[in-house]
Each structure stands twice: as C-alpha cells, then as structure tokens.
Image (cartoon, rainbow, N blue to C red):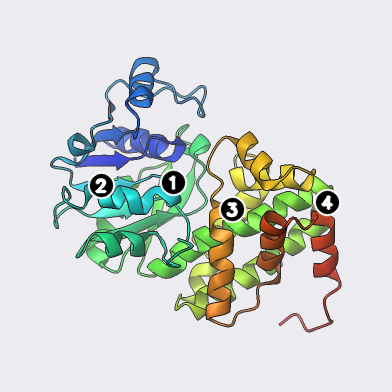
Amino acid sequence: MSKIGVLGSGTWGTALSVLLLKNGHDVILWSFMEEEAKKLRDERVHPSLPGSLIPKELVITSDISEALKDAELIVMAVPSTATRETAKRIRNIVKPSQPIVVVSKGIEESSLFVQTEIIEDVIKDARTAVLSGPSHAEEVIKSLPTVVVAGSKDKSLALFIQETFMNPEFRVYESSDVKGIELGGSLKNVIALAAGMSDGLGYGDNAKAALITRGVHEMSALAVACGADPSTLSGLTGIGDLIVTCDSMHSRNRRAGILIGQGKTMEEATKEVKMVVEGVYSAKAALALGKKYSVTLPIMEAVNKVLFDGLPCRDAVYALMCRERKSEF
C-alpha cells in the first residue's frame, strides 16, 4: 500500500482517486478551493460524475501541504493550463524522493513544453512520469474496462506506476517514450475538435473517418519530428486515445466541436461544455510546433482558423477538400 496525493479534484482526478483507493492505497485528494473540497466531503458525489459515489475513506482537502505530506506518489491531475502554477506552489514542498505522474494532457503555448517538461522546468531534478490513454473518467469511476500506458524515462518509476494503478478493470502498459505519449494525448484533442465540428455540420461517417485517419497522419508526422517513436502514435496513446475522443459524447473536445459546427463561437461552446476544453489551448501550440519542425498540418491549421480567426466551419472544410491533388503517402 502506498500513500498517494492527487492534485486536482476535477472528474479525472476524482476518478483516479477512487480507483487508487479501491486498489488499497491511502489517498488524499486536493482541491484548489475549500468550498469545492467541503462540498465533495459532505455530498460524496462529483457534480460532473452523477451517480458515482465517492467513498467516505477518501480524504479530501484544500491544504496542498497535507496532500503531499509523506506521499510516495504525487498525481498531477490539474488542467494542463494550471500545471505550471501548481508546480510552482509545490516546488518548495515536494521532496526529490517523491515522483510526480502527470495525467493531464496539453502543450504549453508559450514554451511548447508538454506537461512533464513544464514540471521539470519548475522543479529541478523532479522525477516525472505520465499516465495516458483512452480513458474517460465517467467510465473509470464505474470500473468499466480501461487500458492505458504509464511512461517514464526511468523504467523503475514506470513499473511502479504500472503496479500502483493496475487492477482487473484498469490495465496499464509501460513505455519509455514520454514525448510520444504526451504529444499523442495533446494533439488528439485538436483533431477531436475538428471531428466534433464535422458532426455539428452533419457531415456523417465518411467525413469523420477521413478526419480521424488524416489526423493520425498529422499527429504522427509532428510527434516523430519532435523525437517520438512512431509506434507510440499507433498505440493506445495515439490512435486509441484519438478514437475515443472523436467518437464519444464524454469527450469535452468533441462536444465543443459539435457546438462550433452548429454555429456557436469558441467562447460560447467552451462555456456551454462547462469544463476545460484542452484542445483549444493546445491548438496554437501544435501549429507552432509544426512551423518549428517544418511539418505541414492542414487539419490543425484549419481548426486554428475556425477557433481564433472566425473562419466558418463549412469554409474550412471546403478549403481542406480543395487543396492540390497529391498521393496519400
């Protein structure tokens, strides 16, 4: 049994806290706001996970020092946009012996860092890892079968995370390709926005299948240019995560994309979804990475134009369809 501090009481942090508790670990869940922590303690239900009870054994606090004290593993489950600020809050608290596993997905626009790189930038000599894959919180908290990947440059840490999280309903593979895992998890959110826009326009299965397939091509080309192993993008944290995010109504990125396809602005869509839409924050960073490594990203470029330049979705699709003729590979 390990003592584990989970930072971030959103749906994913809450679902993983419940999973880890069921695995026999001593878990403390940290919320940024005391009001939210108290509500979760008192009601034992997350407002975005209705019907799933939070066991009374799960300790919930707004004191970040309490969450980290003597923790053998720190789970960073805050939104990707809050990772740097949270890392700054804990850098004078966390000890070198306390590994940090990141479970959020996103690329920081200002630095083009993935999540583990942000933590390593703020907390020198941090031991970092990532846990990612096709894994909606709404299903994990109900113990529905889920398969993910634990990645770290330190194989012993990846194996420790694998052992800590794995159970008969939650299978965990291990990998050393942290960059590939994180880029797959981040870039697929941008493609999922496009898939949602297609659904919102009513374009059907053919269009979405094409978006997913060409989206895999863009994700893989960019990730490999950044130093990732191409096989990673063909696995759970690439194609696997892309499929679930493009096809499920649990996906906030797809839901936001649907609303945009139906005519809402990006601001209106994200407000209606009521949760952080990570693809919006990774879209500009993905395009910047493409320019840095000279990788052409037509779908991601179109998404950026829709999100930030006001290009109508139909016009973006027309532009994609009417590009010059070329070979598939």
Residue under circle 1?
79
Given the image, on which type of amino acid does mark 2 rest? Arg
Given the image, on which type of amino acid does mark 4 rest? Gly
- Judge the density around disc 4: few (<14), some (14-19), many (≥20) Cα neighbours within 10 Å: few
- Judge the density around disc 3: few (<14), some (14-19), many (≥20) Cα neighbours within 10 Å: many
Question: Which numbered mark, 4 or 1, is in the foreground of this view?
Answer: 1
Label 4 vs 3, first from the N-terminus: 4
Secondary structure at numbered mark 2:
helix
Q: Quadrant of residue 122?
A: bottom left
Q: CA distance from mark 1 to mark 2?
A: 15 Å
The residue furthest top is 42
Label 1 vs 3, first from the N-terminus: 1
Q: Is residue 112 left or right of residue 294?
A: left
x%, y% of residue 1? 19, 40
Q: CA distance from mark 3 to mark 2?
A: 25 Å
Label 4 vs 1, first from the N-terminus: 1
The label number, if any, that marks residue 199 in the structure image: none
Given the image, on which type of amino acid does mark 1 rest? Pro
The label number, if any, that marks residue 280 in the structure image: 3
Residue under circle 2?
89
Residue at image location 45% in from the left, 67% down from the top: 112
In this picture, is 122 found above or below 56?
below
Residue under circle 4?
204
x%, y% of residue 89? 25, 47
Given the image, on which type of amino acid does mark 3 rest? Val
The residue furthest front is 309
x%, y% of residue 21? 30, 33
